[in-house]
Amino acid sequence: MNATTNAAANAAGNATDLIELSERRSAHNYHPLPVVLHSAEGAWVTDVDGRRYLDCLAGYSSLNFGHGNPEILAAAREQLDRLTLTSRAFFHDQFAEFAAGLADLCGKDMILPMNTGAEAVETAIKVARKWGYEVKGVPAEQANIIVMEDNFHGRTTTIVSFSTDPDAHDGFGPYTPGFRLVKYGSAEAIGEAIDENTVAVLLEPIQGEAGVLVPPDGYLSAVRDLCSERGVLFIADEIQSGLGRTGDTFACDHEGVVPDIYVLGKALGGGVVPVSAVAANADVLGVIRPGQHGSTFGGNPLACAVGSAVIRLLRTGEYQARARELGDYLHERLRELVGSGVVAVRGRGLWAGVDVDPSLGTGRQVSEALMRRGVLAKDTHGSTIRLAPPIVVSREDLGWAVDQLAAALEELRAA
């Protein structure tokens, strides 16, 4: 748990110079914490100066299985020596196992692989519209999809068209039509918005970017019932919430809900390569035919080998159980801070949104204070920070991270 290491990392420059060069030669589409990472193992990362940090962000849930997971790396190394890319113009020997394995994990007939989460969301939107026209019989160009306020599904032009975050939305029009915004957590609002041309409801089972917002109990079940009754597809964006993060394979599992389309990404690539996919039954994904959608890199041999390794890890149930157990401990410890610099705590499994008393500082200031104490986390709106350590984190290190948060809040209170 020591926040430093005796041996300095072998790096290509010092942190100050590397940050200055990065800021000068790259677009400022992110505002990173001033730390330059060089190596990592498990739940810990090391910067170019040899200082160690507990990673409590895990690449926004991309690193659910930890940095350098041995089983995932072994699969990647073996595949690197054989074949990395063919394009989907040909079959390759890793594709069938990955497709069947992921479909079975989701309880669906088939998958459509892509690379990034945003690509998978775009895929789900296209599939839903195509299904609406060919299966439901919606008139051409009239399909609408119901989406939630405070959503985050990516940053492509179509996706930001229905974002309510000014930073993501403003200044990028004209916007793609065909989306209806309703309040998150209200099944009644969804029911009122559905009409004869509605083809899908798209939502995050837990809204991550909005501050790890967990909807009311029964919400997902009510949405499932509504979609079934009204002939509408239920699309669950499980890019951040899925694949073990919340203590089940999918966040929808907590209510025993099975959506029509799963949207997956992040952890599916094991922290090694970008891997994403949508999973659905044949009566939904079967509407896509050759030439109507695709990706040169989607479903490539390296991605499939890594994705199959991730699926094998999830089949054991070990990671889901660990996230559940450690998540209970994390939330218990965080709730102890309510009234001592923390206003509220939300989340499920190893995923928490922590609202800090705004009088103490912004979420950015809290994240910087944590960084100085050897913990890496990231702020979101206002004075909220997110905690999502790799599922391999130890109970001891998790408790230490909460201790550092308590100490950081005390420092801010005394300042």
Image (tube, rainbow, N blue to C red):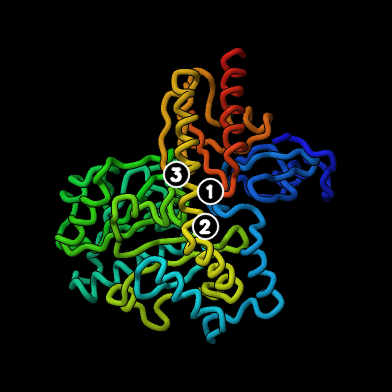
Residue bearing mark 3:
349
* C-alpha span from label 1 to label 3: 14 Å
Q: Do tag 2 and tag 3 residues touch (Cβ < 8 Å)?
A: no
70 vs 392: above or below: below
Amino acid on which the number 3 mark rests in the picture: Gly
User: Which is more N-terminal, label 3 or label 2?
Assistant: 2
Residue sitting at 31 percent across and 57 percent down? 177
Comparing labels 2 and 3, the label whose residue is closer to the camera? 3
Percent x, y of residue 51: 76, 38
Q: CA distance from mark 2 to mark 3?
A: 17 Å
- Residue 162: image x %, image y %? 35, 51
Q: Position of residue 34 (x, y in %)?
A: 69, 37
Please say whether residue 178 is visible from this viewpoint. Answer: no
Label 2: state its secondary structure: helix
Q: Residue at x 64, y 53 (%)?
A: 67
Residue under the image location 63 percent in, 27 percent down: 369
Q: Which residue is mark 1?
A: 60
Quadrant location, the N terminus: top right
- Amino acid type at mark 2: Lys
Where is residue 194, by image quadrant? bottom left
Image height of 178 relative to 365, above or below: below
Closer to us: 391 or 229: 391
Q: Crowdedness of circle 1 by 10 Å Cα count: few (<14), some, many (20+)?
A: many
- Tags 2 and 1 touching, CB below 8 Å: yes
> Compared with residue 393, is residue 291 higher up or lower down, i.e. above or below?
below
Residue identified by numbered label 2? 266
| Residue type marked 1 | Tyr
Quadrant hosting residue 407: top right
Please name whichever residue, 37 or 183, is drawn nearer the observer in this view of the structure.
37
In front of the other: 122 or 203: 203
Compared across the picture, whether 59 is left or right of 193 comes to right
Q: Which mark is residue 342?
A: none
